[in-house]
């Protein structure tokens, strides 16, 4: 059951690699609209799903760098180093970040591309997808495997560059982004064959 949608339609020219410096980003506010977000609201432990996100440049200027930041909601998610993890507060752990989802290698990717689509930044939670032309929509997918049961909110924020002088804004002037609700359960789904010969959950 897929709920929440935000796609990024592939109109950017970025691919995997190091993100460019924010020193050359033109200052300003760049209007964008989150067009679609898609991620299963109910998942099973070990299930692999695509999180699809779409953002449109609704302004008249090229966005210097389309930025997407992910974090699991709550203090433990905010404190973690990585986007799809929570920080275990137990002291003395060699690696306190505990994944809720594992991100597949060579992801994220632009829709329809076999190549990685987001450049690395100094913040592991932040993905840089490069320039986005006026009127263009970027479609991007993250391939995630559920590894921890529970109910989660995955928060995302969209920006127009890495520097403080560059901001993405909605039509109302607020920060673009949203929350994606997902429940991960350990139970194996019961399946039946329907009248059309399709295998579906009971």
Image (tube, helix red, strand yellow):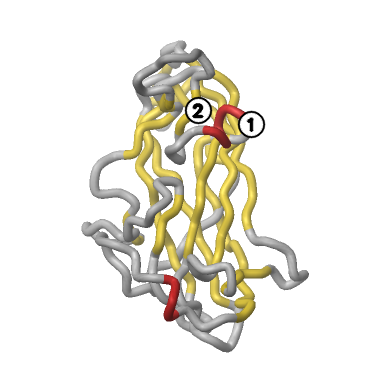
Cβ–Cβ under 8 Å for marks 2 and 1: yes
Q: Position of residue 12 (x, y in %)?
A: 38, 73
Q: Secondary structure at mark 1?
A: loop
Label 2 Cα neighbours within 10 Å, binned few <14 / some 14-19 / many ≥20: many
Which of the 4 image quadrants contains residue 34? Answer: bottom right
Q: Residue furthest bottom?
A: 60
Which sits in the foreground, 156 or 195?
Answer: 156
Q: Can residue 202 be spotted in the picture?
A: no
Q: Position of residue 95 (x, y in %)?
A: 36, 23
Q: Is residue 143 above or below residue 116?
A: above
Which of the 4 image quadrants contains residue 131? Answer: bottom left
Which sits in the foreground, 31 or 48?
Answer: 31
- Does 180 sit left or right of 130 as displayed? right
What is the spatial separation of the Cα atoms under label 2 and label 1, in whole angstroms? 9 Å
Q: Position of residue 74 (x, y in %)?
A: 64, 31
Q: Residue furthest right?
A: 172
Quickly name the residue at label 1.
74
Q: Can residue 113 be spotted in the picture?
A: yes
Label 1 Cα neighbours within 10 Å, binned few <14 / some 14-19 / many ≥20: few
Q: Position of residue 199 (x, y in %)?
A: 38, 26
Name the residue at 45% across, 52% down.
126
Q: Is residue 115 above or below residue 185?
A: below
Which of the 4 image quadrants contains residue 94? Answer: top left
- Does 111 sit left or right of 169 as displayed? left
Name the residue at 62% across, 55% down.
177
Which sits in the foreground, 159 or 38?
Answer: 159
Q: Earlier in the sequence, mark 2 or mark 1?
A: 1
Quickly name the residue at label 2.
86
Name the residue at 50% across, 26% down.
87
Q: Secondary structure at mark 2?
A: strand
- Does 36 sit left or right of 195 as displayed? right
Q: Is residue 101 above or below residue 56?
A: above
């Amino acid at each position: 059951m897929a709920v929440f949608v935000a796609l990024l339609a592939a109109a950017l020219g970025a691919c995997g690699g190091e993100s460019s410096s924010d020193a050359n980003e033109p200052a300003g506010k760049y209007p964008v609209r989150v067009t679609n977000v898609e991620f299963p609201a109910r998942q099973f432990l070990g299930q692999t799903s695509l999180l699809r996100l779409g953002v449109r440049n609704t302004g008249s200027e090229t966005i210097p760098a389309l930025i997407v930041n992910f974090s699991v909601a709550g203090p433990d998610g905010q404190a973690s180093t990585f986007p799809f993890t929570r920080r275990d507060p137990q002291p003395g752990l060699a690696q306190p970040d505990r994944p809720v989802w594992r991100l597949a290698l060579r992801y994220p990717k632009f829709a329809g591309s076999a190549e990685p689509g987001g450049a690395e930044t100094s913040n592991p939670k932040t993905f840089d997808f490069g320039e986005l032309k006026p009127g263009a929509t970027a479609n991007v997918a993250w391939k995630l495997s559920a590894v921890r049961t529970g109910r989660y909110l995955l928060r995302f924020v969209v920006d127009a560059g890495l520097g403080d002088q560059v901001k993405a804004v909605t039509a109302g002037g607020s920060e673009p982004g949203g929350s994606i609700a997902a429940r991960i359960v350990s139970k194996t789904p019961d399946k039946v064959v329907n009248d059309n010969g399709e295998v579906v959950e009971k």
